[in-house]
Image: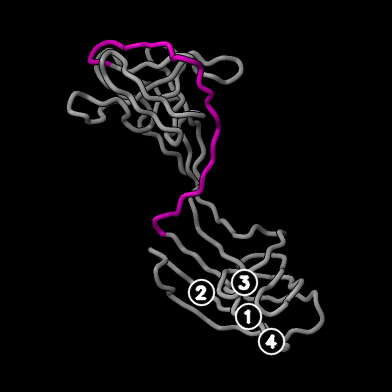
Amino acid sequence: MRYVLIPALLFSLSACTTIQVQKAPSVEPTIGTDPSIGSTSTATVGSAVLSQYKLWKKSGMQLAEPYSGRIGGAPVDVSQTDYLVKAVADSKEAYCTERMTMRNLLGVAIKPTCFSGLTADGHVTEVMVPADSVWWHKDLPRPIAIRAVEESILRPEAFRNELVFLGSAGKTLRLLYREYSGDFVRPAFSQDVAYDVEALPMEIQFRTARIQVLELPGSSIKYRVLSSF
């Protein structure tokens, strides 16, 4: 199932200044694992061997560097982490900030900032902001690259489960399974598990999580994740 965050198909800022959204950053639910399936890792006593998270994956466009300036007397501050909405603004193809980034005289952010003049190599050359009835335009001091980005965000209904390495003694490997929900402060459920160690490498399994144990010196474990929970 896919979710798309669209502030509005049309930002109606005033009678003459509108932003028609063409493509907004998207957010879709996903499940992340650490380490990734198939990778080889090392864990010490008390650290997680395998974690799985329910996440949101957000993708969109951002500036490659922050921009600060004044346009028409109004201060504008756009960070590298601001997502940009592909849109049409003042009859131009533009990339406009999701959040309000132009401030009024009281210092309150009240309007978005747009960047236009996209070059063939992916740089914007102009910054523009909406006034009450017209657009203010200004050439950038130098072109700024825009880039496609993707990040993971914990979902409100966040859930995490993990296996923690508790150490090994003799021929016994001990792990702790924990489940967290909500704020991740305290586990909602935990369970100690133990495995008899024979010749290495060997495969162990908890529920649907499968781990290949490669080395087990005692205070650490070297392993490969074969599948997750």
> In this view, which residue lies farthest toward the bottom?
170
* Left or right: 198 in relation to 205: right
Label whose residue precedes the other's in the sequence (2 or 3): 3
Q: Name the element at disc 1.
A: strand
User: Which residue is denoted by mark 2 in the rendering?
Assistant: 178
**To which quarter of the image does residue 85 belong?**
top left
Residue stretch in magenta: 131-157
Label whose residue precedes the other's in the sequence (4 or 3): 3
Camera-near label (2 vs 3) is 3
- Residue at 52 percent across and 68 percent down: it is 161
Camera-near label (4 vs 3) is 3
Number of other residues with Cα within 10 Å of mark 3, as a class: few under 14, some 14 to 19, many 20 or more: some
User: Which residue is denoted by mark 4 in the rendering?
Assistant: 172
Label whose residue precedes the other's in the sequence (1 or 4): 1
The correct choice, above or below, for 161 with respect to 106 in the image is: below
Number of other residues with Cα within 10 Å of mark 2, as a class: few under 14, some 14 to 19, many 20 or more: some
Q: Name the element at disc 3.
A: strand
The correct choice, above or below, for 107 with respect to 183 in the image is: above
Q: How many marks?
A: 4
Q: Position of residue 125 (x, y in %)?
A: 48, 14
Label whose residue precedes the other's in the sequence (3 or 1): 3
- Mark 1 is on which residue type? Gly
Number of other residues with Cα within 10 Å of mark 4, as a class: few under 14, some 14 to 19, many 20 or more: few
User: Which residue is denoted by mark 1 in the rendering?
Assistant: 167
- Mark 4 is on which residue type? Thr
Q: Name the element at disc 2.
A: strand
* Left or right: 93 in relation to 32: left
